[in-house]
Image: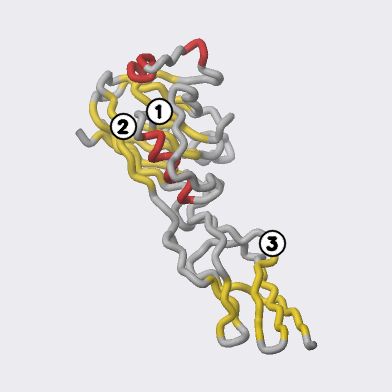
Amino acid sequence: MNISVERLSVEPNGHRIPTTIRAAVTRLGGASYVSAMGPSNCRFCGESPNLLLVAGETVRAQDPCPYPNGITTDITINVPSGRIIVTDDLRPVYDREPVPFVTLNSSLGQARRVEAMASIGCAYGPVSSCAGLYRTGPDSYIIASPDYDQDDEPSLPEDTLVAEVAINRWAYSIADIEDWKARGGDPEQVEWTYTVADVAPGTYRFVHHSEAHGFNGEAPGTVVFAHVERIG
């Protein structure tokens, strides 16, 4: 019986799988069997794609990734009081797992988590170091990490900084403070630092970018994680 094993690279078909992933192709008689060598979960959809041997010499993910460009998440929260609490973690007051659950190590999992939190009134999203909420106009903001020059001057004007975001949870959490208090929020129980800021009352739209294709939270220069604007 003739058995041979080959190691071939994988054509991802839109999936974002580890660049080092290889497939083992076992040929036994006239049959061929394909298996991934190592973890192959897609960073975008969270799935481990089925692998096919094409034309006897190329390994390809069978089905295309449904999110080849990653995911940009668009949510809204209401701020009727005109005051927001900004910190890295507003649990346990706001804490909802997405249903159905998808691993948070994927863009889809993070997007569902962002949407689940927004459904109960909390704008949430992952960030990297030195993030803050910055005003860019009368009713518009960004959640961003500024760059710093050789004199330690930030790329974003310091007078536009509304609130810093602690990085203990590597995320921001923003909600109407009166809604937070009504749900049992207690300032003395917040684990890390927080800021209460005045904004125009209304509905705020958050467009979160960290799960989009090509986004790099550690890129040089100012990194914008989310755009925020009052829409009503």
Query: Which numbered disc flags the more N-terminal residue, 3 or 1?
Result: 3
- The residue that disc 2 covers is 77
> Could you tell me which secondary element the residue under label 3 belongs to?
loop
Q: Callout 2 environment at 10 Å: few (<14), some (14 to 19), or many (20+)?
A: many
Do the numbered discs 2 and 1 sit on residues whose CB atoms are within 8 Å? yes
Q: Amino acid at mark 1?
A: Ile
Residue 33: give x, y in percent of width and height: 66, 77
| Residue ID at (25%, 31%) | 203
Residue closest to the far front: 1
- The residue that disc 3 covers is 38
| Residue ID at (46%, 68%) | 64
Q: Is residue 110 above or below residue 12?
A: above
- The residue that disc 1 covers is 174
Q: Quadrant of the C terminus?
A: top left
| Residue ID at (36%, 30%) | 120
Residue 23: give x, y in percent of width and height: 66, 72
Residue 165: give x, y in percent of width and height: 49, 29
Please tell me which residue lies in front, 101 or 211. Answer: 101
| Residue ID at (58%, 71%) | 51
Q: CA distance from mark 2 to mark 1?
A: 9 Å
Q: Amino acid at mark 2?
A: Ile
Q: CA distance from mark 3 to mark 1?
A: 38 Å
Do the numbered discs 3 and 2 sit on residues whose CB atoms are within 8 Å? no
Query: Which numbered disc flags the more N-terminal residue, 3 or 2?
Result: 3
Q: Is residue 102 above or below residue 119?
A: below
Q: Nearer the viewer, mark 3 or mark 1?
A: 3
> Could you tell me which secondary element the residue under label 2 belongs to?
strand
Q: Callout 1 environment at 10 Å: few (<14), some (14 to 19), or many (20+)?
A: many
